[in-house]
Amino acid sequence: MTAIKTGSRILILDFGSQYTQLIARRLRELKVYCEIYPCDAPLARIREFEPKGIVLSGGPYSVYDKGAPGLSAAGKADGKTASGDLFGLAVPVLGICYGMQYLARRFGGTVISARAREYGRAFIRRPADAKSALLPAEFMGGAANQKANQKIEKLQTWMSHGDEIGKIPKGFRLTAISHNGSPAAMEDSARGLYAVQFHPEVAHTEKGIEIFENFAYRICGLKPDWDMHSFLEEQVRLVREKVGAARAICAISGGVDSTVAATLVNRAIGSRLTCIFVNNGLLRKDEAVEVVRAYKKHLKLNVKLVDAEKRFLSALKGVTDPEKKRKIIGREFIRVFEAEARKVRGARFLVQGTLYPDVIESVPPPREVSGASGSAGFSSTIKSHHNVGGLPADMKFALIEPLRELFKDEVRALGRELSVPPGILRRHPFPGPGLAVRVMGEVTRERLDILREADSIFTEEIHRAGLYDEIWQAFVAYLPIRSVGVMGDGRTFDHVVALRAVTSQDGMTADWYPFEPEFLAHVSNRITGNVRGVNRVVYDVSSKPPSTIEWE
Ligand code: XMP
């Protein structure tokens, strides 16, 4: 699928910073379309993108490192530009951190080992008489209110650098200095070159968003015209063009990404899209029926429910190792999906809910660069995530990935545009291997049923308490041990289940949710009172790290 061609387009060239994706997030928050290319992307590819502005990211290198990353067409390290180099495109450039040092070196300045290495919080101030179209107006003394000026005499920024600019290149002006006396920002407005040593993309930099706003709107002259409505129209048009009169198939799971991708393609080609929902027997209580009903009723999708419960459970019989379980489930899924896909005559396209973070071409960390010669050492590795990527080679589908330019929160916004029910857009993440990784030890029908009952009580109570949206994920895990209890006048020797609920931003780190004791007591009573075979409920109070969110 070709990239979208809206008016406002900024290209981010990545030098390997951990914050590069944040730059893209900030620009898109400003409704400016942007993409990330590796820094050594060929000039022809950059031209084809038609950027109205270019951002050079930070990176974990020194510009003098052997094999340090550079642009494919940077031109000579002097003050001149030529039509055959990136700076000859006459497009405004913003260099951030390493990007600033790269600009300094390219335009005849010097970069030295920092006299005071700055990591984390650093305050910057304005040199006397400095002017800047990039830095926040209040900081530059441009605000009408004198008091406001005084407040922003010192701006908090976030730094992470071991090198600094020694000599500013000819034609550039210093526009900010750090409290350690290091150059913190410089610009050459005549040539449209701007640079900051700090990271305006991170939340800890005060007024960072204003810096991007100034760059995009004032300096590049862009308008906030990237929105989900125009994105949707463009994608629907592209899908129609690509599929023509053929058919497409899509595996849907009830999760946000596959649902939004399928709904978009359905809008483009209607019932020529066949969606396949596999019930692997590892879903939550009533999930298969409810999800398929929602797909048909609200989204008018052409869905086929495939019941493969027996097949998955017999393949999992006797298996206790978590990784083996995952492998078996993946393998069986491909077999089932393949058999179903073959039944859809004329299907030539496979729809997938791949997101932008899965396809950004990444620049590896310095360790992998050392010893490599020139730019070949960091030429891009494409991380490609395929939900059903292991399909056999003779199944030749062309891929349709309408979400591959979007971040997760943008997918939710697109879902709203497509009228996907809020219940689906707000759903907690659910792992592909389903309840199999929540039953410790062997997965059996009996254990799954116990888990489903307990899980449905826990989830219902969370909804009832109005806590669902505050929590990233909440579920129950089944433990393969028994403990002694007393019910009525009799002794019991029954199963234990663990409640797990966490808060998280992205699933990478997580903290346990601090429920009120009364809430936990109520859930525990309901589970032990209603789920036969459970006489003990425990609450998991572990964060990630050192634990993980799931138990397996
Ligand atoms: P962990 O347990 O590693 O999980 O802290 C982080 C997030 O990933 C989900 N998860 C999976 N998702 N297939 C998936 O599609 C898997 O095998 C899998 N394992 C974990 C987990 O639910 C959490 O949101």
Image: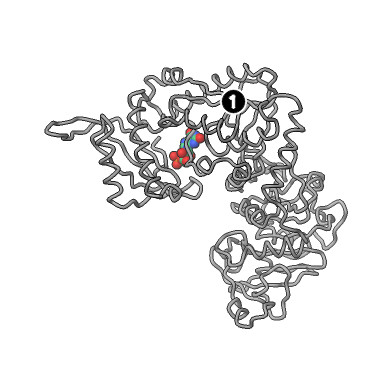
Q: Is residue 466 left or right of residue 392?
A: left
Residue 200 vertical position relative to residue 434 in the rendered view, above or below: below
**Colour scheme shown:** one colour
Q: Which residue lies at the image location 70% right of the left edge and 48% below the top edge? A: 35
Could you say which is closer to the camera, residue 433 or residue 262? 262
**Looking at this rendering, what residue extends furthest in the front direction?**
297
At horizontal 65% and vertical 32% (from top left) the residue drawn is: 266
As helix, strand or loop, the secondary structure at mark 1 comes to: loop
- Count the marks: how many? 1
- Residue nearest the observer in this picture, 90 or 113: 90
- Direction right: furthest residue: 83
Question: What is the quadrant of residue 223 in the picture?
Answer: bottom right
Left or right of 408: which side holds 456? left
The relative height of residue 138 versus residue 386 in the rendered view (above or below) is: below
Q: Residue furthest left?
A: 489
Q: Quadrant of the C terminus?
A: top left
Q: Which amino acid does label 1 sit on?
A: Gly
